[in-house]
Image: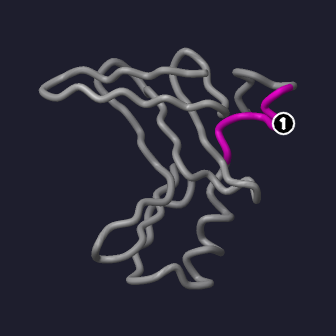
């Protein structure tokens, strides 16, 4: 189990029972190996946060290699875009804990 605590003006805690991570980032994928959440500490002043995010306005997908796309609904175009987002880590997680893709 991974516990991630982010502090600042507000403090949040994320508990993940199954995922892959290292000292500077974490990634949660779905059963199709689409990244649902990616957090990567680039340096002490830069944090990348990507994945699939839902809001009242629709769905947005953010990936380092792909940029971002926003749509009012989860269309085939959005799913196709999400499948092209590069994974940060090697899988399966059980055999590659903390091993990043090059």
Q: Would you say residue 18 sits in the magenta stretch?
A: no
- Name the main secondary structure of what is drawn in magenta: loop
Residue extending furthest right?
95
For the point 36% across and 27% down, the residue is 13
Q: Quadrant of the N terminus?
A: top right
Pick the residue in front: 62 or 6. Answer: 6
Q: In the image, is 71 to the left or to the right of 81?
A: left
Q: Residue 69 is drawn in which quadrant?
A: bottom left
Q: Residue 6 is drawn in which quadrant?
A: top left
Q: Is residue 70 above or below residue 13?
A: below
Q: In the image, is 11 to the left or to the right of 83?
A: left
For the point 52% across and 79% down, the residue is 74
Q: In the image, is 100 to the left or to the right of 61?
A: right
| Category of crowding for the residue at label 1, using alpha-carbon neighbours closer than 10 angstroms: few (below 14), some (14–19), many (at least 20) | few
Figure disc tally: 1
Q: Is residue 84 above or below residue 44?
A: below
Residue 28, position as x, y percentages in the image: 61, 42
Instruction: Give the residue at mark 1.
Output: 92
Q: Which residues are magenta?
A: 87-94
For the point 61% across and 51% down, the residue is 35
Residue 27, position as x, y percentages in the image: 59, 38
Q: Is residue 99 above or below residue 18?
A: above
Residue 5, position as x, y percentages in the image: 36, 20
């Amino acid at each position: 189990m991974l516990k991630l605590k982010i502090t600042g003006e507000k403090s949040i805690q994320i508990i993940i029972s199954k995922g892959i991570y290292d000292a500077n980032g974490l990634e949660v994928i779905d059963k199709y190996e689409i990244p649902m959440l990616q957090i990567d500490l680039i340096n002490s002043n830069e944090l990348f946060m990507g994945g699939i995010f839902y809001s009242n306005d629709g769905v947005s997908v953010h990936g380092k290699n792909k940029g971002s796309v926003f749509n009012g609904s989860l269309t085939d175009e959005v799913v196709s875009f999400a499948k092209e987002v590069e994974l940060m880590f090697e899988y399966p997680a059980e055999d590659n804990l903390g091993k990043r893709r090059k």
